[in-house]
Image (spheres, rainbow, N blue to C red):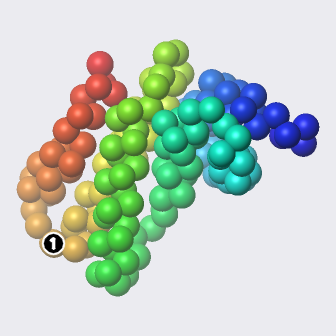
Amino acid sequence: MAAEMFDTAHRIFMDKIAPFKIISRQESCLLPIISTLNEHRYDITNWGSEGEVYYSYLNLPTTIPQGEEDMELLRHKISIAGHQLNNLPYNTPQQICAVNMMGLRTCNLLVEVWRALFGESENRELLLTMKTFSSSQRLLD
């Protein structure tokens, strides 16, 4: 990226680096890369449908906030990330596996937020989560 070839760096990130690191559960090392790419998003072809999806996903918190307002904001952020994942292009088995893993983490995070907000039964939460990600079936095909 030092040569300011951000479009090329984005393509390598999408095709090789990100799927491998997601699958190997080394997501934290992706954040500095995707953050740098995000700073140059206007110079990157397909950023909105590709890199921005990883950026949104990687910026999801690992813990649930305590305040109700913060949880509502997080619920909205998770929903957006889930919908973006549904449209993320993928071609290789590694990309498919990475998208599935990202979708699973996103759904689990949403269920945690529902529990914290509403204290509803697990079955109700699962149905609500499935409804939120109704087009996630594409990820499992």
> Which part of the image, by quadrant, shows the C terminus?
top left
- Residue ID at (40%, 38%): 85
Q: Residues within 10 Å of mark 1 (few under 14, many from 20)?
A: few
Q: Amino acid at mark 1?
A: Gly
Depth order, front residue of 109/15: 15
In this picture, residue 58 sits left or right of residue 26:
left
Classify mark 1: helix, strand or loop. Answer: loop
Figure check: 22 above or below 69: above
- Residue ID at (22%, 67%): 115
Query: Percent x, y for residue 59?
Result: 54, 58
Q: Residue furthest bottom?
A: 67
Figure check: 105 above or below 77: above
Q: Which residue is mark 1?
A: 119
In this picture, residue 13 sits left or right of residue 3:
left
Q: Is residue 29 in view?
A: no
Query: Percent x, y for residue 48?
Result: 52, 41
Q: Is residue 50 in view?
A: yes
> Which part of the image, by quadrant, shows the N terminus?
top right
